[in-house]
Amino acid sequence: MIYQNLITEVKEHLLYITINREKSLNALNRSVLSELATVIDFAKHADEVRGVIITGAGEKAFVAGADIKEFADYDGKKGEELARDGQQKVFNAIENSPKPFIAAINGFALGGGLELAMACHIRIASENAKLGLPEVTLGLIPGYGGTQRLTQLVGKGRAIEMITTANMITAVQAEKFGLVNYVVAQTDLIGKAEEILNFVKQRAPLAVAAAIRAVIASVNEVDGYKVEVESFGKCFETSDFKEGVVAFLEKRKPQFVGK
């Protein structure tokens, strides 16, 4: 599919998504969010996709926030609708995807951009990246899950400090806080994401999906242990489980098919 604001490509079972609004520092607007919702849904259902890498065009920004002009005249009801719709169709859809999403943060990740990165399962930042949630400088708070996911990732104290001061942090600080998994040179950013997903591609797809669901349940559901037990049991019903056991006993690499 051809997009107006995204560049997408499936290569060797990986889906590459580039937000392509470099002149606007890849800011999120209605059109970008709509296209993201479409490609996220595609990734969920496409058997050929085993993992997703999302990044921004250019070397300055991953996503430097939302397009403020679009909601400058909103009232409370419209604001709630904006947040609810975005969370459901994009941010929560990424987090709940059975395919692992990696955010390759190639520059500024601010506001909705950091929220987008936090919705991904793994985050890798380039050395020049700056991260922050500046919404209180506009008289707002993060509305795409930022208050929740930042707290989950860095703890209550760090989250309150970052959100209420609106100060940016460096990639190195983000790694120290647990906000990103790795910091690498910008030239190595996509390569590091590919390295991780190439390991994932060797594993059983249904087990990977079950593992993601169980981990997400640990923070989003009342009883994550119950989800883990149920998911564990369902794995025994898959052909991949039988292949994994036979391959282990025969001392060979398993050939998983995702069934």
Image (tube, grey):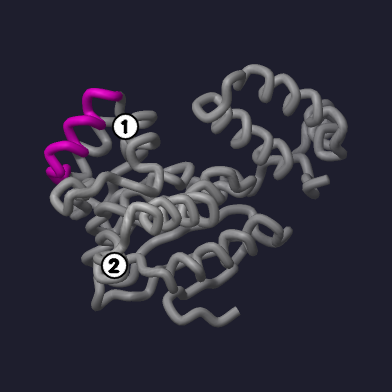
Name the residue nearer the viewer: 145 or 210. Answer: 145
Q: Is residue 44 above or below residue 23?
A: above
Which residue is depicted at the point 66% across and 45% down?
Answer: 202
State which region is magenta.
156-169
Whether residue 153 is visible to the viewer of this picture, yes or no, is yes
- Residue named by callout 2: 67
Which residue is depicted at the point 25% across and 31% down?
Answer: 159
Whether residue 187 is visible to the viewer of this picture, yes or no, is no
Q: Position of residue 210 (x, y in %)?
A: 68, 35
Which mark, residue 178?
A: 1
Residue 205 counted in the magenta span: no
Q: Nearer the viewer, mark 1 or mark 2?
A: 2
- Amino acid carrying label 2: it is Asp
- Amino acid carrying label 1: it is Gly
Residue 157 counted in the magenta span: yes
Q: Position of residue 244 (x, y in %)?
A: 79, 34
Name the residue nearer the viewer: 198 or 72. Answer: 72
Horizontally, residue 250 falls left or right of residue 137, namely right
Horizontally, residue 16 falls left or right of residue 28, namely right
**Quarter of the rendering containing residue 21:** bottom left
Name the residue nearer the viewer: 211 or 25. Answer: 25
Badge 1 marks a residue whose secondary structure is: loop
Q: Position of residue 92 (x, y in %)?
A: 52, 47
Task: Say whether disc 1 or disc 2 marks the residue closer to the N-terminus.
Answer: 2
Separation (CA) of disc 1 from disc 2? 28 Å
Which mark, residue 96?
A: none
Q: Position of residue 157 (x, y in %)?
A: 22, 23
